[in-house]
Image: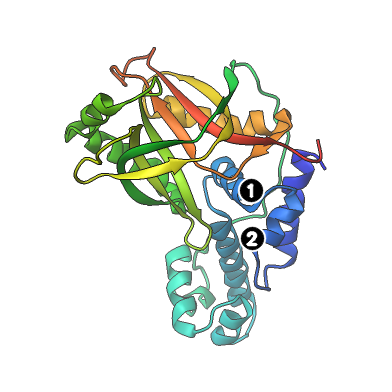
Amino acid sequence: MDYIQGMQSAIDFMEDHLLEPLDIEKISKKAGYSAFHFMRMFNILTGITVGEYIRNRKLTLAGCELALSDSKVVDIAFKYGYETHESFTKAFKRFHGISPSAARELGMKLKSTGKLTIQVILKGDKILNYKFIEKDSFTVVGKKINVTCKDGENYKIIPKFCNKCNQDGTCDTLGKLCRDDMGVMGICTNYDKETDSFDYYMAATYRGEIPKGMETLDIPKQTWAVFESVGPMPDAIQDVWKRIFSEWFPASGYEHAEGPELEVYEMGDMSKPDYKSYVWIPVIKTANK
């Protein structure tokens, strides 16, 4: 099964079972990828999480049904997986901007999220430089926050956290603690499929006493695909992330291995057009390729 067919099969499966409890393991199996890889790929390619897509599609259909039928609000709420009238009303208002009862009034505006369709777009006008690295296990020390992927919040929260670490001296401290040539890094790990969130560390390799306010994280032995980013932060490296998942993974014959993702930062002015940083992703050869 190729990448396009796999992703579309997963989307079709979600659409065919919208009125049933959906399990991410079953969805990702339709795509031919691990749950972690599928969720990360879906989020980066679409800008929303799998959970958000399912919720938005349900609320889209519920809005149509309210406007065009005489079914009771509570029955429609149960049909689309809400256990109470109150929880349905809250979610409906957040998505449509009006209450379920107001949706039945003529002239009221409703919002709609259509079914996703995967399309092939020819790209490749920009070079994506990468290499493979085998690295033994190592330990890092640093500060962390928990970040949600919902509504693209990770793209907003992480840059703010990095700026804070630059301003409060955390990055300077980490730079002095480095014990190899990797430098200061950002680490995404401990992805939680129930909350669509993960831990983000600002860290550096280190052995010894743990500085106050910091904690350690063990990185296992991995094969890494390392991608170069050139340009000001955070836009340049965010663009590389999207290209990795939209261009490189589909054509590479590799998939995301279980393990953390790293961003490695060179020392220097991150706003310069020639600033270099790197994305490290643990990979394994795809079984069916």
The answer to whether one can see residue 98 in this image is no
The single residue placed furthest to the left in the displayed view is 168
Q: Give whichever of discs 2 and 1 has the lower sequence position.
A: 2
| Residue toward you, 216 or 35 | 216
**Cα–Cα gap, marks 2 and 1:** 9 Å
* Quadrant of image for the C terminus: top right
Whether residue 6 sits left or right of residue 102 in the image: it is right
- Residue 88 percent coordinates (x, y): 49, 77
Which residue sits at x=70%, y=25%? 122
Which label number is shown at residue 240? none
Crowding near pointer 2: few (<14 within 10 Å), some, many (20+)? many
Q: Amino acid at mark 2?
A: Ile
Q: Is residue 234 above or below residue 28?
A: above
Judging from the image, what secondary structure is the residue with disc 1 in? helix
- Residue 89 percent coordinates (x, y): 46, 77
* Quadrant of image for the N terminus: top right
Q: Is residue 146 above or below residue 122?
A: below
Name the residue carrying label 1: 38
- Residue 234 percent coordinates (x, y): 38, 29
The single residue placed furthest to the top in the displayed view is 274
Name the residue carrying label 2: 24
Which image quarter: residue 184?
top left
Which image quarter: residue 237?
top left
Q: Amino acid at mark 1?
A: Phe
Colour convention of the picture: rainbow
| Numbered label tally | 2
Instruction: Confirm or deny contact between disc 2 and disc 1 (CB under 8 A).
Output: yes
